Amino acid sequence: MSENCSIEVAEDGCAYLSGELTFESTPDLYRQAEAIIRENDSIRAIDLAGITRVDSAGLALMLEWQAIRTANGQKLQFSKAPVSLLSLAQLCEAADLLSMTARTPVK
């Protein structure tokens, strides 16, 4: 059984995702976050540090969010992405569509 994914919005204009961003969790997350992403123009960034697993459904949801914002003349910044997400985005030729930075490696 997979872990759910949740979104929390902070006062600083950043949304924080945590859990597994997968085929199993994206329908619930989509319903939870739809109004947040569509109607809250103050959100400029989504922090992915809390993501423990991601698959193509998670990537598709992020692309949907970016498309919503691009249609409104804005762009989301995705930060602290896991390496697996960066690799998947590159493999799907979607990396250029997302403004995404990687997690800082632990030294």
Image: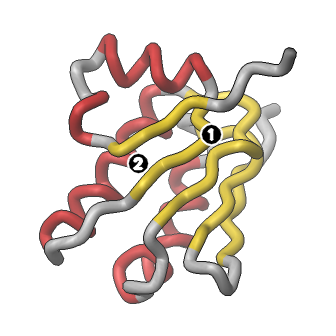
Quarter location, residue 76: bottom left
Q: Residue at x 28, y 62 (%)?
A: 75
Q: Can you give x and y, in whole percent of width and height, for residue 39 in the image?
A: 38, 88
Which of the numbered marks, if any, corresponds to residue 62? 2
Give the image location of residue 96, x and y in percent. 23, 32
Which residue occupies the foreground of this view, 84 or 56? 84
In the picture as drawn, the residue positioned furthest to the front comes out as 107
The disc, 2 or 1, on the residue closer to the chain's N-terminal end is 2
Q: Is residue 63 left or right of residue 21?
A: left
15 in relation to 46, above or below: below
Residue drawn at x 54%, y 49% as measured from the top left: 26
Task: State the quadrant of the C terminus.
Answer: top right
Amino acid residing under circle 1: Lys
Give the alpha-carbon distance from disc 2 to disc 1, as whole Å: 14 Å
Q: How many numbered marks, from 0 up?
A: 2
Tag 2: Cα neighbours inside 10 Å, few (<14), some, or many (≥20)?
Answer: many
Residue highlighted by disc 1:
80
Residue type marked 2: Met
Secondary structure beneath label 1: strand
Marker disc for residue 1: none
27 vs 41, left or right, is right
